[in-house]
Amino acid sequence: MQKKNEPVRIQKILSESGVMSRRKAEDYIEKGKVTVNGRKAVIGQKIDPVRDVIAVEGVRVDTRQHQKKIYLALHKPRGYVTTMSDEMDRRCVAQLVQDAPGRVYPIGRLDRNSEGLLLLTNDGDFANQIMHPRYHIPKCYRVTVRPDISDEQAMRLAEGVELDGQRTAPAQVTVLSKEPGRVVVQIVITEGRNRQIRRMCEAVGLEVARLKRISIGPVRLGMLPPGKWRMLTQPELSALQSAMQRGRTWTGKEESKYAGNETGSK
């Protein structure tokens, strides 16, 4: 077991403190987002978890090991960036979870103009598994597009489109309603590329007017008001962990069961 004052690699500290996985820690360190005593950290740097002060994106990390794991669901409103701090002084999701029972960090992102379900945790390995495409955790979005959607466009979205030279994985696309000049579509994906839904729609000639994530695996947004959070239930955690352990692909029936009742509360 690690002695309290023995130097430890910074990636290990960030992982054991529940901030993020070691792989993500390396990425953040390379991008200069991690500091030790006010100076940019380097990969492999050894630190004293008792004396040294570590910060991620300007937020100090609690380096006490074996802290209680926290798993939250937040209804992110539009106009907030998915970061714990922002150098441009924009509103960020950290402001919405200040009353959480401990320091938590977002699992993945929703861009500033998107809204809906966002999971946060201090369990770095759990977060990495949720985001990794190998575990096939479905993310369900309700998307309002303009002006209309053709059968060909819906088929292209479902079959996959080229983004950055790589085709997206197959998606589930369902037209929910149509009005003059706009259509509401439900899209389910198992990847998590940067601004993926918006870019997929743009690739087939659709303009996204509104984008709302309504479920991640078995976790639903439900009646959670914008800007509010709740703890994940044990059944939700068990279902997510079981899915990740098996690395299985969820079926359309399972996803529609979870995502089709956006207005239902638990």
Image (cartoon, rainbow, N blue to C red):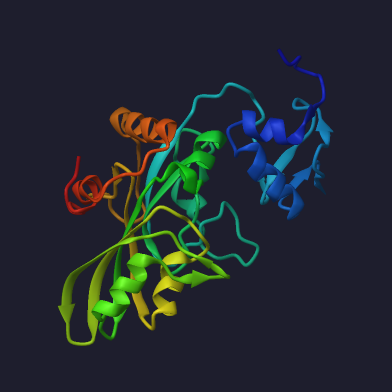
User: In the image, what residue occupies the spot 32% across and 28% down?
Assistant: 234
Location of the C terminus by quadrant is: top left
Give the left or right position of residue 34, taking residue 140 as reference. right
Specify the quadrant of the image occupied by residue 218.
Answer: top left
Observer-nearest of 252 and 35: 252
Is residue 232 visible from the viewing direction of this image? yes
Observer-nearest of 189 and 211: 189
Figure check: 114 above or below 76: below
Figure check: 79 above or below 50: below
x, y percentage for residue 107?
Answer: 49, 47
x, y percentage for residue 175?
Answer: 21, 70
Location of the N terminus by quadrant is: top right
x, y percentage for residue 210?
Answer: 33, 72
Figure check: 39 above or below 164: above
Specify the quadrant of the image occupied by residue 26.
Answer: top right
User: In the image, what residue occupies the spot 24% across and 78% down?
Assistant: 151
Give the left or right position of residue 65, taking residue 193 as reference. right
x, y percentage for residue 85?
Answer: 60, 55
Give the left or right position of residue 252, taking residue 231 as reference. left
Figure check: 183 above or below 247: below
Give the left or right position of residue 118, taking residue 16 as reference. left
Is residue 60 visible from the viewing direction of this image? no
Specify the quadrant of the image occupied by residue 124.
Answer: top right
Total number of numbered labels? 0
